[in-house]
Amino acid sequence: MKQVVQNYKSGELAVLDVPVPGCKPGGVLVRTAYSLISTGTELMKVSEAGMSMLGKARSRPDQVAKVMQSVATNGVPATYRKVMGKLDSYTPLGYSLCGVVEQVGAGIDDVKVGDLVACAGNEHALHAELNWVPRNLYTPVPDGLAPRHAAFGTVGSIAMQGVRQGEPQLGEVALVIGLGLIGQLVAQLLTASGVRVVGVDPDPVRCELAERLGAAACGDPASAAVEAAVAELTDGHGVDQVYLAAGGGSSNQPVELAARLCRDRGRVVDIGKCRLDLPWNAYYEKELDVRFSRSYGPGRYDPEYELEGRDYPIGYVRWTERRNLACFLDLLARDRVDVEPLVSHVADFDDAVETYRSLKDGELKAVAVLFRYPEARAEAEAPAVAVPTVNVKPSPARSAGTPVRLAFIGAGNYATSMLLPHLAGREGVELSTVVTTTALSAANAQRKFGFAEATTDLDAVLGDKSVDAVFVVTRHSSHADLTRKALLAGKAVFVEKPLALTEDELADVLAAVEESGNDRLQVGFNRRFAPLLQEARKRFGARTGPASLRYLVNAGRLQHGSWYLQQGTEGSRFAGEGGHFIDTASWLLEADPESVYAVATSGGEDLQVVLRYPDGSTATISYVTTGAPGFPKETLDLVADGKVLRLDDFVRATVHGRKRWVSSRLPKARDKGQNAELAAFVKAVRTGGPMPVPLESLVATTSATLAVRAGLAGGAPVTLARAL
């Protein structure tokens, strides 16, 4: 199995192949689905490992004292060998995860194989594919709680134990200093307990996040606004409790701020590892009660409790380590605490080393980072669309010099204005047949674009073995059925969006792919092929952190009589063209969405669609019909890693970063990528190479588009299944 390890001497991080742990009595073997990086504790350890020997000594004076004691006892040579041997070895990382029980040890009767459990412990809940976890360090996950959320169980228990040490009461006011992962959870737990929270952190993004999740006010520790908020909420008396959740550092500011803002005889609880040079006069004069919170709760560091499974009687110890873990999961399951907004990034386990490097170097700014293990991709979450596995056969390449023969089903306005002008006269392309429902429209297309034949007989085209590819450019309601028939006939298919209007239609298309082994499918998502957007994406460059994308679509009102208004048969406007914008967002974010949340204005004219991606990125699509006709139709902003990409209606693009790039203004005839898209499709048909957009991505975009309707009906986010 694979496990993340670190050499404390060299600082090297690695994902090593190590033996699978045995399933000993008194515990369970757990296959990890998600594990959580502690961006405080673990990064401190990673940073220390990268220091010089002198730097390591300065950062850990406690360990230096042990070394000196060993020198006095064992002598320099023996101590040196012992220290170097310990430093120059791999140590594990991680202590909070969620996974599935794979094997049950003797004496365990509260879980069974296949159960989902949350696990704790820096020796048992490691960043590894498999972990053996003793009884008191795991707890079953409540039904309906997502595994990625249950992976927060351990850090949630740390925050919960800190709050318990503060003994909050209804109506009190608390100050949380440090709004990292632990501080954010402390603030939410206090709010859920009926306590008003003031948060302090120099990062305005973290302050805004805490306020969004329930804090009354947040601000910079040097800001007068924080003191003003405390004065207003407490009538000038000061807060009842202070929770020190700040990370390590040399500053004594947190404890000084605590003394200044705490009321007489208030409580100060140290949860994080910060400097504690208590200003004696300030703490004495107010008779402040300073308390420490020891990790997950009672039982921590007790080998009889943690390793031998000896529980403490509930009458004597109400909240043990394991009971805190179960309590936090219960709050998550009942939506009293929300950890999803804290997830800044989700990385595949295989990318662990690069993820740690990005965090350490500051390239990845994060509150919480999760590792996703291979099994998590098949986790049991309610899908919007259940899609069968598709087995496809490779498409043969065509002989050199043989033209690609194309047939069109439909020759309406879009086909004749946006597609056929790019294909007529193109070298290596032969327009074979055009099929329409009326003879006149077929004849017009034949005359204008040079089709060899014009007909209203669809079966004749599908049965023509000389036709290599079929374009489906008809009304939305017929797309899925025509695509299915063309795939079964062995044709490559270019279908204009949407691919399908319902989940059943999408399933029928995929059943045709499965039955025929023909996956030669392209949906007309052309914007990703637009030269201006491609150049802007290139200038923007690679990113390491999650991104925020905003896409404003000023769709405008439809003319009376438009068939787009026939929602009963042709679907909603967003179902018809929303895939364009979702595909563009997914292409820019280099992933398929995993959830969709949609809300509409009264009357349903304007939509807000929020897409969430596996790495924590989000895309918000504002699809509006009530805007000014003279305003640009499409504007897009992509923000990540201190960079901003701006697209103005495919006329101009800018990228702001270390250097600013501005494109030249394009002519009024905007290039939205149709020509490049068609060239890529024709090349794929000619060479037998992969289609321009993977089938999985096409299906994911279609599923996300369809999920908007379900989200509007249910008023809640819709989780998407993996496409294939």
Image (spheres, rainbow, N blue to C red):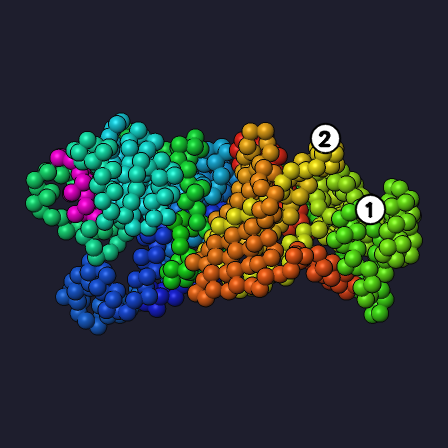
The residue at 55%/32% (across/down) is 601
Residue 722: give its label: none
Q: Is residue 110 left or right of residue 404?
A: left
Q: Is residue 528 left or right of residue 436?
A: left
**Would you identify the image quadrant in which residue 85 lies?**
bottom left
Q: Please, which residue is most extreme toward the bottom here? A: 77
Residue 357 image position (x, y, % from top left) = 41, 62
Label 2, residues with CA under 10 Å away: few <14, some 14-19, many ≥20? few
Along the line of sight, which residue is nearer the eye, 366 or 198?
198
* Residue bearing the label numbered 1: 410
Q: Is residue 130 above or below residue 424?
A: above
Give whichever of discs 2 and 1 has the lower sequence position.
1
* Residue bearing the label numbered 2: 568
Report helix, strand or loop for mark 1.
loop
Label 1, residues with CA under 10 Å away: few <14, some 14-19, many ≥20? many
Along the line of sight, which residue is nearer the eye, 535 or 78?
535
Residue 211 image position (x, y, % from top left) = 35, 39
Q: Amino acid at mark 2?
A: Gly
Q: CA distance from mark 2 to mark 1?
A: 21 Å
Q: Is residue 461 above or below residue 242?
A: below
Residue 130 image position (x, y, % from top left) = 47, 50
The residue at 84%/69% (across/down) is 401
**Would you identify the image quadrant in which residue 119 lies?**
top left
Report helix, strand or loop for mark 2.
helix
The residue at 40%/52% (across/down) is 366
Residue 346 at least partly seen: no
Q: Is residue 564 above or below residue 58?
A: above
Q: Amino acid at mark 1?
A: Gly
The residue at 30%/38% (across/down) is 217
**Would you identify the image quadrant in which residue 11 lies?**
bottom left
Q: Which residues are magenta?
A: 254-272
Magenta span includes 165: no
